[in-house]
Amino acid sequence: MSNQTIYLPNYTVGADAYDKIAYITAPYGKKAVVVGGEIAMSKARQALSNSVENTAITLLGFLWYGGNATMENVQRLQADPLVQQADMIFAVGGGRACDTLKVLGALLDKPVFTFPTLASNCAACTSLSVMYHEDGSFKDYAYQNHPPLHTFINTQIIAESPVSLFWAGIGDALSKEYEVAYCCRDKQLSHLPQLGLGIAKTCTAPLLKHAKKALADCRSHRVSAELEEVVLDIIMLTGIVSNCTVHISDQIAPADQYYYNSSLAHCVYYGSSLIPACESHLHGEIVAFGVLCLLKYDANDTEFNRILAFNKSLGLPITLADIDLTTDDLPIIADKAASVIEWRHAPGTPTKEKFIEAIVETDRLGQLAK
């Protein structure tokens, strides 16, 4: 095995998390450019500005990241004078903003600090980016050699974020334990993925216990213990797992690379990204349905029934119609699924026929549960 350097995410959480910005970022320079989503930056701008007032840190300016995680947006930002002048990049917003700026930081060899303004996925602390074509369809993954240097989780800003995105984030986090456990099956795991598997097994319980209360608190824009637990589950628990279960980069020998981070639930999402009728549905929303499909594919009826009831209780999808798909779309979804890395690392030899059968059966049982 080649030499390994292990990086795990660092983070600060709380309604006053930004108070630590100057102290934590100071060793990396004095000039930061803030880049992110337009709404996200409007929510965080005052708190960010206040946090560096009377410190050695200067915010050079606020730039829109472009609206999607594409290489075209990365290249546009790479040429921006403020980005070129900056010592470090402050990435503000959701998953696609963070993913774009992690790629940008890697290309420029500049430190990236992330400021998630909503809890919809774990992109703020992972060392990979999900990249898309300009038409919005999934393109591929981009791998970084380490995660962002620090993640600042302002729970008050997240409590004021759209509840629909928080709801979808719960659906995305729901996949982590089931996908990692499924993908690691029958593998000889070394230290790091074994650690990731162990942490993955802690991801489901907080969601089942706290999600309903956390969603109610988000609707009321109230920071609570339950909201913080679910936020940390979505952003940090699943993100730490990702950093342990993905080991792919140009600095790692091919024989030592592995991908145990996600599986067939995300295959449903990547396939659905090709279906125009599904475009209005959120990533985590579709993944939540994909979790049911994975459990049905794996003939895990006990967990299938438990998650079916959970999804129904929160209004997460349990049928194809819930995400505007039909059985006519399934061959397209299966073809795309069979082309992604998750398919290649699934245990056994997955088949498109069995994958489609699992989706159809999930839809049938979901309809019966309505």
Image (cartoon, grey):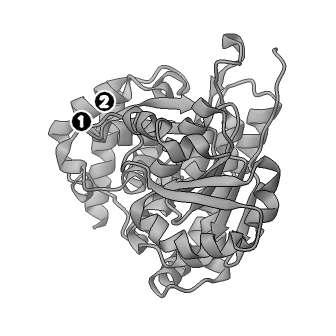
Please name the residue shown 82% across and 29% down the image.
5
Q: Is residue 62 left or right of residue 153?
A: left
Residue 283: give x, y in percent of width and height. Answer: 39, 51
The secondary structure type at the circle numbered 1 is: helix
Residue 298: give x, y in percent of width and height. Answer: 49, 38
Q: Is residue 332 above or below residue 325?
A: above
Please name the residue shown 44% across and 33% down the image.
75
Is residue 309 at least partly visible in the picture? no
Between residue 310 and residue 226, name the one nearer to us.
226
- Give the position of the C terminus as an image quadrant: bottom left
Is residue 337 at least partly visible in the picture? yes
- 2 and 1 marks in contact (CB < 8 Å): yes
The residue under label 2 is which amino acid type? Answer: Ala
Q: Is residue 249 above or below residue 71?
A: above
Q: What is the C-alpha distance between the residues marked 2 and 1?
A: 6 Å
Please name the residue shown 45% across and 37% down the image.
74
- Give the position of the N terminus as an image quadrant: top right
Between residue 42 and residue 270, name the one nearer to us.
42
To which residue does mark 1 refer? 330
To which residue does mark 2 refer? 334
Q: Quadrant of residue 360?
A: top left
The residue under label 1 is which amino acid type? Answer: Leu
Between residue 35 and residue 179, name the one nearer to us.
35
Q: Is residue 320 left or right of residue 195?
A: left
How crowded pointer 1 is (Cα within 10 Å; few <14, some 14-19, many 20+) is rated as many
Residue 43: give x, y in percent of width and height. Answer: 48, 73
